Image (cartoon, grey):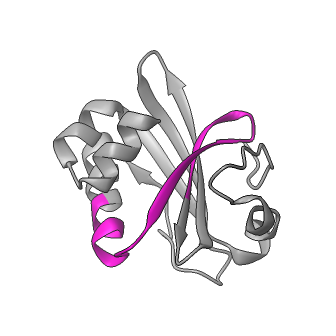
Amino acid sequence: MRRVREAWESKDIAALVGLLDPGAVMTADGGGLAGSAPHPVEGATRIARYMVAVADRAPGLELLERSVNGVPGLVARRAGEVETVASFEISGRRVTRIWVVRNPEKLRPWLRAARPDAGTGVAVAPH
């Protein structure tokens, strides 16, 4: 997760592509209450470009490495507020699947658990 976080923070598309499986799929849930990709994003290059576009539109985004649904994940906060929780399925050394939750109703458990020192395994998205 550290390498994914660092590549995302530095907006390094090539590094992200190298960390993603060529057939990776990213699914996002905004619940109609927060912006998200309306359809799954497929392929390492498309996902990497999408992640960098999100970083471009979200200055000041802080990424924290956390366990999500028992798998590696990232929690994205801005101004101390949780905006996104993502979990990652990894096979070998590459990310094969990303589940992103932006729906504020599903993020409520993370609001109190998102302190920088809080490690949480709160489930927010079905797998």
The quadrant in which residue 9 appears is bottom left
Name the image quarter holding the C terminus: top right
Left or right of 66 in this view: 47: left
Q: Residue furthest top?
A: 92
- Residue drawn at point x = 24 percent, y = 53 percent: 10
Q: Is residue 54 visible?
A: yes
Residue 73 lies in the magenta stretch? yes
Left or right of 18 in this view: 102: right
The quadrant in which residue 67 appears is top right
The quadrant in which residue 22 appears is top left
Left or right of 62 in this view: 27: right
Residue 107 at x, y = what percent?
A: 74, 67
Q: Residue furthest bottom?
A: 33
Q: How many marks?
A: 0
- Residue drawn at point x = 77 percent, y = 43 percent: 121
Residue 50 at x, y = what percent?
A: 32, 60
**What segment carries the magenta color?**
52-75
Residue 31 at x, y = what percent?
A: 68, 75
Q: Residue furthest front?
A: 117
Left or right of 31 in this view: 47: left
Q: Is residue 29 visible?
A: no
- Residue drawn at point x = 82 percent, y = 63 percent: 109
Height in image: 19 above or below 26? Answer: above
Residue 48 lies in the magenta stretch? no
Height in image: 16 above or below 81? Answer: above
Height in image: 3 above or below 81? Answer: above
- Residue drawn at point x = 75 percent, y = 69 percent: 111
Residue 71 at x, y = what percent?
A: 66, 33
